[in-house]
Image: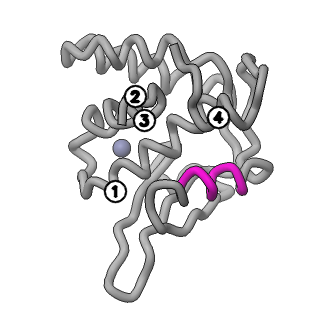
Amino acid sequence: MIEHSFAQDNFKGLTIMDDLQLTEHRSFIERLVGRHITARVKLVPWKAELGGKLGQAHWGSPTELPLILHPECITVAEIEQSLFELALRGRVTGNPKLMEHADEIGSSEQYLEHLVLHEVAHIKNNWRQDRETDCDLWVYAEMHGET
Ligand SMILES: [Zn+2]
């Protein structure tokens, strides 16, 4: 069970899935990112810019900070589809923690924490796009206070 995650502590009592307007959660996102890495956050109006994905991480260069991108808005249907895919990957790859994690995310704020931390994991650990499961297991540990 997720008990003292960042979202849990910042949005007490919220346990519903609702469409997410990330523009309203910018400071939450920036504070969450800032706990782990120094990076810029950009919210884009068109999901096509992210190749249909809900998040993207760009590594920095010696002169530029890393960049985390998310769409400005994410619908409940997109959250549910994403959690379904997470659970499915857990099943296919034999990672019950991923299935458990997909199942226990019960509010859109918790989902947002998961989503942001996933991109943080890419940058912080220098894990490329083929390390999706490693990123999600890192998020799982983070949201369960195992780190
Ligand atoms: Zn990823």
Q: What residue do we see at 60% from left, 37% from top?
A: 6
Relative placement, left or right, of 96 versus 14 is left
> Which residues make up the magenta segment?
27-33
Q: Residues within 10 Å of mark 3 (few under 14, many from 20)?
A: some
Q: What residue do we see at 44% from left, 76% from top?
A: 65
Is tag 4's residue or tag 1's residue first in the polypeptide sequence?
4
Disc 2: which residue: 140
Is tag 2's residue or tag 1's residue first in the polypeptide sequence?
1
Label 4: state its secondary structure: helix
Q: Are marks 2 and 3 in contact (CB under 8 Å)?
A: yes
Disc 3: which residue: 142
Q: Are marks 3 and 4 in contact (CB under 8 Å)?
A: no
The amino acid sitting under disc 2 is Tyr
List x then y, in percent, for residue 49: 53, 58
Q: What residue do we see at 21% from left, 44% from top?
A: 130
Is tag 4's residue or tag 2's residue first in the polypeptide sequence?
4
Disc 4: which residue: 7
Q: Is mark 4 within 8 Å of ligand 1?
A: no
Label 4, label 2: how far apart the Cα atoms are: 13 Å
Image colouring: one colour
